[in-house]
C-alpha cells in the first residue's frame, strides 16, 4: 500500500477508534488495516495507537499526526475537486441528513427537484431523530432543529418551529378542551418520546415557566404513530408544529394551549466549516433555502 493509502487507513481508524470499523468502511480486511498501521508507525518511528483487546486510542503523537493528516487529505480533496470541475458543476454523491418526519415531508420533495435539475449528482439521504457527528458519518449537509452547540459549522437559518399541543376535534368534543396546562392531568396523553423525552412538560405564561407532570396513556417512539393516534381520537399529544401543520390545516387535528407555547426553535441548514463548499453542496443548500423559507409550516 502506498503512503497516501496508509494515511487514509490511519485517519479512518483514528476517527472511529477501531481497526474493525476502518476495515469495514474502507472495504479492507482487518489484517490489512493492522499491517498498514504497523508499517506507518515503523516508518515514522513513533507509536500512534495504544491498543487493548477491546479498543484502540490515539497516543499524543497520534493525536498530532491525525490533525496534520486530516488537513492534508482535506487539501487533497479540494485539489481533486477543483481539477475535476466539482467547484463549478454539481457532480458526485451528496450525503444529507435531517430529522425523520422533516426529511420525509419536506426534504425528499426538494431532493427530487434537485436531482431533476442536476443529473450528474446522486444523493444519499439519512434521516434520524438524533444529532449525529457529520464528520464521522461522512455527511455533508444537515438540517438541524434547535440551537446549535457547535460553532464549527456554516449555518443558514431557514425558519422556526414550536412545540404544539393538539388532538382531534372528536376527542375534544368528547373530553373537553384544556384551558390551561394543568388541565392536561385530566386528559389521555399520547407521548411522542422523540419530541418529549420527559413526562414533565414545560409551558410559558405571563407569570413565567410552568411545568406539568403528565401520565402517558400511549407512549410512542415514532412521531408518525403519535400523530395517527391523535387523529384517531386516542388523546392529546405534543409535537413539533411542522409535524402536524398539514393535519391542523386540514382540520384533522386542533391546536390547544397556544398562549402557553414555549419559545420557538430555529431550523438551520449546516455544512462543515473549513471545507470549501463544492457546487453540489452550494446548489443544494440554495434550493433548500429557497423552498424552506416559503414553507408555511416552519414559520
Image: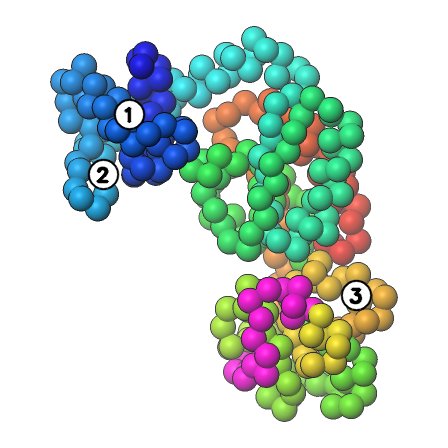
Residue at x 50%, y 25% (from the top left corner)? 275
Q: Earlier in the sequence, mark 1 or mark 2?
A: 1
User: Spatial distance from mark 1 to mark 2, Cα to Cα?
Assistant: 19 Å
Please state if 113 lies on the left or on the right of 84 as rendered: right
Classify mark 2: helix, strand or loop. strand
User: Spatial distance from mark 1 to mark 3, Cα to Cα?
Assistant: 54 Å
Q: Return the residue found at the far top.
A: 83
In the foreground, 141 or 25: 25
Please say if 138 is above or below 81. Answer: below
Name the residue that disc number 1 marks.
32
Classify mark 1: helix, strand or loop. helix
Name the residue that disc number 3 marks.
247
Residue at x 15%, y 27% (from the top left corner)? 47
Classify mark 3: helix, strand or loop. helix
User: Spatial distance from mark 3 to mark 2, Cα to Cα?
Assistant: 50 Å
Give the number of callouts.
3
Name the residue that disc number 2 marks.
57
For the record, the magenta segment spans 205-227
Disc 1: CA contacts within 10 A as few (<14), some (14-19) or many (>=20): some
Amino acid at each position: 500500500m502506498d503512503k497516501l493509502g496508509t494515511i487514509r487507513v490511519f485517519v479512518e481508524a483514528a476517527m472511529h477508534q477501531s481497526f474493525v470499523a476502518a476495515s469495514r468502511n474502507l472495504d479492507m480486511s482487518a489484517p490489512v488495516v493492522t499491517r498498514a498501521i504497523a508499517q506507518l508507525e515503523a516508518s515514522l518511528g513513533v507509536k500512534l495507537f495504544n491498543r487493548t483487546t477491546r479498543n484502540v486510542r490515539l497516543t499524543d503523537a497520534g493525536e498530532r499526526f491525525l490533525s496534520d493528516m486530516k488537513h492534508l487529505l482535506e487539501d487533497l480533496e479540494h485539489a481533486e475537486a477543483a481539477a475535476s470541475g466539482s467547484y463549478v458543476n454539481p457532480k458526485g454523491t451528496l450525503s444529507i441528513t435531517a430529522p425523520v418526519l422533516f426529511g420525509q415531508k419536506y426534504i425528499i420533495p426538494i431532493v427530487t427537484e434537485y436531482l431533476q435539475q442536476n443529473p450528474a449528482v446522486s444523493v444519499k439521504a439519512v434521516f434520524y431523530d438524533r444529532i449525529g457527528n457529520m464528520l464521522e458519518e461522512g455527511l455533508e449537509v444537515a438540517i438541524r432543529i434547535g440551537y446549535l452547540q457547535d460553532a464549527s459549522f456554516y449555518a443558514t437559518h431557514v425558519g422556526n418551529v414550536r412545540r404544539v399541543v393538539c388532538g382531534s376535534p372528536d376527542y375534544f368534543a368528547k373530553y373537553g378542551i384544556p384551558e390551561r396546562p394543568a388541565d392536561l392531568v385530566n386528559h389521555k396523553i399520547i407521548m411522542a418520546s422523540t419530541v418529549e423525552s420527559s413526562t414533565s412538560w414545560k409551558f410559558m405564561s405571563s407569570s413565567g415557566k410552568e411545568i406539568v407532570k403528565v401520565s402517558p396513556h400511549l407512549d410512542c417512539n415514532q412521531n408518525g404513530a403519535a400523530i395517527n393516534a391523535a387523529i384517531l381520537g386516542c388523546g392529546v399529544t405534543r409535537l413539533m408544529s411542522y409535524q402536524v401543520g398539514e393535519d391542523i390545516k386540514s382540520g384533522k387535528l386542533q391546536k390547544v394551549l397556544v398562549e402557553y407555547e414555549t419559545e420557538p426553535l430555529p431550523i438551520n441548514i449546516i455544512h462543515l466549516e473549513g471545507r470549501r463548499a463544492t457546487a453540489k453542496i452550494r446548489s443544494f443548500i440554495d434550493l433548500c433555502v429557497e423552498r424552506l423559507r416559503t414553507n408555511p409550516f416552519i414559520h
